[in-house]
Amino acid sequence: MPDVPPARPGPSPSGPAASGDSDDEALAALGYKPGLKRTLGNFHTFAAGISYISILTGTFQLFYFGVSFGGPAYWWSWPMVFVGQLMVALCFCELAARFPVAGSVYNWSKQTGGPHVGWLAGWMMTVATMVSLAAVALAYQLTLPQISSVFQVIGDGTGKYDAAANAVLLGTILIVFTTVVNAFGVKLMATINSAGVAVELVAAVVLVVLLAAHITRGPGVIVQTNGFGQGQTLGYFGAFLTASLASAYVMYGFDTASSLGEESIDPARNAPRAILRALVASFILGGLILLFALLATPDLHAKELSTEGLQYVVKAALGETTGQAVLWCVAIAITVCALSVQTAGLRLAFAMARDNNLPGGSKLARLSPRFQTPVLATCLIGLVAIAILVVNINQPQIFSVVTSIAIALIYIAYLLVTLPLLRQRLRGEWTPAPGRFSLGRFGLPINILAVLWGALMTVNLLWPRASVYNATDPQHWYLRWGGVLFVGVVGVGGFAYYWFVQRKHTGVVAEHAAGELPEPPGAHGAP
């Protein structure tokens, strides 16, 4: 049976998305009728993007990792990752302006690369989101027990598996909360998320100022390697590549701002702005936090830097009371980050289910009459994320393993967007929506850089380093190659299922299909 395209071609340059017609008409041009509740404004979409990146969550969760493997000079990985991800984000901005639809990565790759590429990108991103939700939830363990020993429910934290087991417990509680909030509707989610982002942004600025006021050394510290890389084949460069994962783990998820396209007002115009603002704000604030933390920490050789990380610096440099206040803000940031990650994953799963591209698609895409959210899909994402935590309950390297796999999947999903887009550019088939965000003549070089960056970082993330995937004894080859094996099974196994089973049923579910519309002028010229 031949494939049935999951949706109509995207709006032409002179179609609804470009001419300023209603948001719902732009959606109908893609083959869907409105179902989600369109209530979100500019700040809501910006908040969704920046809360997914979550400056405080990422820096506090992974500072220890960067310092442990690269010393203070690991800081340079922050601007490096920003420049690479900026290339990706700029490509996404053009796509968001032309295809303002839920499930951004899935729908973008479907429009530029066809239904098979679109399905694989959506599948990889859906799995990545569920693993990411588990990874973000683990950040509670790195923060809450630092505030009070009350939060160390399992053991006293000194046992080999105390931290991992307690992380699973705290993470499960957080995921249950985010699942309930997402099930109750986008308005509640957006209200909580926006309030949390406001707290996070204020806290980040205050933290930068406080750390700057407690500087004890000059900026020359960020060129110190502390001897890392000695004896390695690649020298410090090899150590730096490992340490750079700490920055790569943070700056992603900016596409969330566009994934809410069917619930946002004027998404074709606002989503590109939200994507760039979220990424740039995160880069500036996060970079300053990391820089001033290195300049303010009492002892650059303290073992606590490699165990407690930024939490130790804050408490040691700012004092116990101020430090704990900052850590409470970090806990809020972790909460809204997890909420945003699940929100993005939910929209992605909904978009795929609406095209009947997931098992039980019609049920997963069904919207609650009361809340106008796909409740079943929400619960499924939460349950899978909890299952991922439980499987790793006795894994001491739970933090680096789960996070590495999640980010590798996301980088691959991003590649499945930027690579087909580059193919269209080279063939002269890509046309940005007139009057909306456009890279102009810089589109091709930026797109090439985005693809190269994504490919190189994917290799870096999946490289079978014992320090990441099997840092403690006993050493097992399958643990060291765990990232490659997991991603391979998800990619190859998932696509095999799609090719032999799911693609035969692909097509917009009847209750979500738009009625026939007059063909917009110039539609036949759209790629």
Image: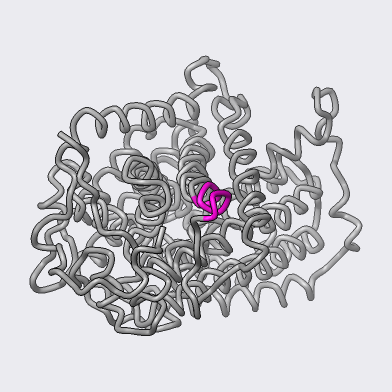
| Residue 468 screen position, x and y as percent | 59, 32
Instruction: Identify the residue at horizontal 52%, vertical 37% (top origin).
Output: 158
Residue 234 visible to an observer of this rendering? yes
The vertical placement of 46 against 3, above or below, is below
* Residue extent of the magenta highlight: 421-428
Instruction: Identify the residue at horizontal 13%, vertical 55% (top origin).
Output: 509
| Residue 152 screen position, x and y as percent | 43, 49
> Viewer-proximal residue, 154 or 337?
337
Q: Left or right of 411: which side holds 66? A: right
Q: Left or right of 64: which side holds 515? A: left
Which quadrant is the N terminus positioned in? Answer: top left
* Secondary structure, magenta segment, majority class: helix
> Viewer-proximal residue, 159 or 131?
131
The vertical placement of 312 against 273, above or below, is above
| Residue 6 screen position, x and y as percent | 23, 51
Instruction: Identify the residue at horizontal 86%, vertical 35% (top origin).
Output: 227
